[in-house]
Amino acid sequence: MSYLLDGKRIVMGTDYYPEHWDPSMWDEDLKRMQETGIEVIRIAEFAWNKFEPREGEFTFSFFDDFLAHCNACSMKVIFGTPTATPPAWMTDKYPEVLNAKMDGTLYRHGARRHYNYNSVVYQNFTKELVEKLASHYGPNPAIVGWQIDNEINCECNEFYSESDTLAFRRFLKDKYGTIENLNKAWGTVFWNQTYTAWSEVYVPRVTLSNNTNPHEVLDYKRFVSDSACRWAKMQSDIIARYRKPGDFITTNGIFQDIDSHRMTQESLDFITYDSYPNMAYELDTNLPAGDLKDRNWSMMLDEVRSIHGIYGIMEQQSGANGWNVRMVSPTPRPGQITLWTMQSIAHGADYIGYFRWRTATMGTEIYWHGILDYSSRENRRIAEIRKIHSLFQKIGSVAGNAYEANVGILESYDNKWDAELDIWHAEIEKQSAAAIYRAAQFTHTPIDYVYLRENTGAEDLTKYKVLFYPHAMIANGQQVKILQEYVAQGGILVLGCRAGLKTMTGQCTQENLPGVFRELAGAEVTEFTFVAKDEGITHAGWDGTEMETVLFNEELAPLGSAKVLARYEDSYYQGSPALIENSVGKGKVYYLGSAFSENTAQIFLEKLQVANPYGNLISLPRDCEIAVRSNGSESYLFVLNYSKEEQKLTLHKQMNDLYRGEMVSGELTLEGYGTRVFKIEEQ
């Protein structure tokens, strides 16, 4: 058990940068934090120069002094390794540590994350620094955990330095063995891209119209993930030798082109996340889930939970966010900090660390506001956070309980990465991902994201009554075998169009579609097309229910004893099968030859009898989200109102309102942006 996730209580923290403030402010800040309910702070993740002001010259006096203040008042500390911001003396003398654009232009000093993981020079500097920090600060009683780097792959998830090319070649040699195998996997016979030596292979480079080999780019994304994971492990292995018993190792955030499951398994005790729902209110926002707005962050939190069921929030929104060069957003409205905090807890967080204690008065993040503004004056936000702390005392028994869901959405990193580089895949994935999540949210149906990995077994899936795999373009026989075992034991699998289109190299299969899913789905694709814009939304009838078949439509044919459940009602393929049901053992597979709209996803949830699983306990309007955390014997029901207007709820059985400490039932009023946590009393 770690200090943050001990399963006994919800812990409150914040991020603090002592190097930004005069030391005369430290004691007052620490005392005020504790009076607010804050007992943990994160420090040091951008402070390399405070430890190594010049090459090879190490000093610990600054943070020794600050940690002495922390120990004096019993403030606990998460210590960050400051490797996201290499110092100017290094980048000036050793430009090979810098990352580069695709055209080779180096990212120069002046921002952050401008290094590349694969520079041997940077790796050596990092190893030396982390060794010094871990050995010196590891025994300090104030420290309860370590954060590796900061937001790995944030802002930039592409690496095109010479060091990356050399490392990419090693990665490919290990994977393919020979240049001939590489040529086959990448299909280099197309457009005469054949390689004759490893020295001819580079990370993706600028080409005419930026047309790059998609199979090369898929492997490149795998390589970027591998590099980031090795980077985390390099630091974690060092810290592990010096940390005190019980001190944890984590890192914060989940970003593109990184296998966060692998990184967590290899290097972390648990992962933490940085939650900024206020980005939904940016002036130029373009969120995939549309009018979910800040509720869309529940989708991100569900993704984090797929990595580690109970997790922490290293950075929780506490003010307006924005840099001087991008992002403009409003200050959280009264009640929204509480709402977003409870959103995180409802989805599995047992630690909430607010970013940040004080708003920076200098640098790029002068508009990324914290709990306090530029001065020390009291404000509405710190008052709200004090109230949140009092709520933490009332709902502490929620800690350690798991999020409940009997519907899962399957994912794989290969498919996620392919959808980033393949516009055909991207269009249908974006459509269906948003639609299914919206349908789940608005029917009050909690979901889990479930990743298919090398060690995934059917036993990992059997807790779910229904699994959606919207567009399993890249898949192999082993994954299909696991899904078949899940279905045979009574599970229900819903597949969407384009399943089985590609092999693991990203090449299109020559098998009849849906490729490796053909037998499991009991279906065959005879024709397919994107829906022309002049046709609008097409439809299919399913047992008298009209459902939308959007964006991409496949004409299907049933195989064996499989049944046609719905046929297209529009376009030149009117009358062709659109939905096929196949019985496999005790379960069923549904193959929809289309992308999902919210309407279609809702129909599936309702017809498969998994929508609104807590409808016998509570009725609530569309603007409210429901979540349940349970340990099997005790269950806690969260209700979150994302509207500024008050909402009416109806409890169909008596429950314990933990906020008020009283038994309640019947109709209740939830204020705008209001939240409640009810303990479900067993009868």
Image: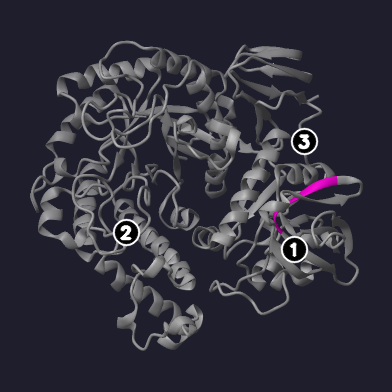
* Nearer to the camera, 217 or 210: 210
Residue drawn 46% across the image and 46% down it: 270
Quick one: label 2, few (<14), some, or many (20+) residues within 10 Å?
Answer: some
Looking at the picture, does residue 667 appear above or below residue 289? above
Residue drawn 37% across the image and 42% down it: 247
Q: Range of the magenta residues?
A: 546-552
Looking at the picture, does residue 316 appear above or below residue 663? below
Residue drawn 21% across the image and 59% down it: 97
Where is residue 506 shown, x and y percent of the image? 55, 71
Q: Kindly identify the amino acid type of the residue bearing the numbered disc 2.
A: Met
Q: Which mark is residue 234?
A: 2
Residue drawn 87% across the image and 50% down it: 542
Q: Mark 3, mark 2: which one is toward the viewer?
A: 3
For marks 2 and 1, the one nearer the N-term is 2
Q: Kindly identify the amino acid type of the residue bearing the numbered disc 1.
A: Glu
Q: Which residue is mark 1?
A: 554
Where is residue 370 shown, x and y percent of the image? 34, 25
Q: Mark 1, mark 3: which one is toward the viewer?
A: 1
Q: Is residue 404 visible?
A: no
> Majority secondary structure of the magenta segment?
strand
Q: Secondary structure at mark 2?
A: helix
Tags 1 and 3 in contact by the CB under 8 Å rule?
no
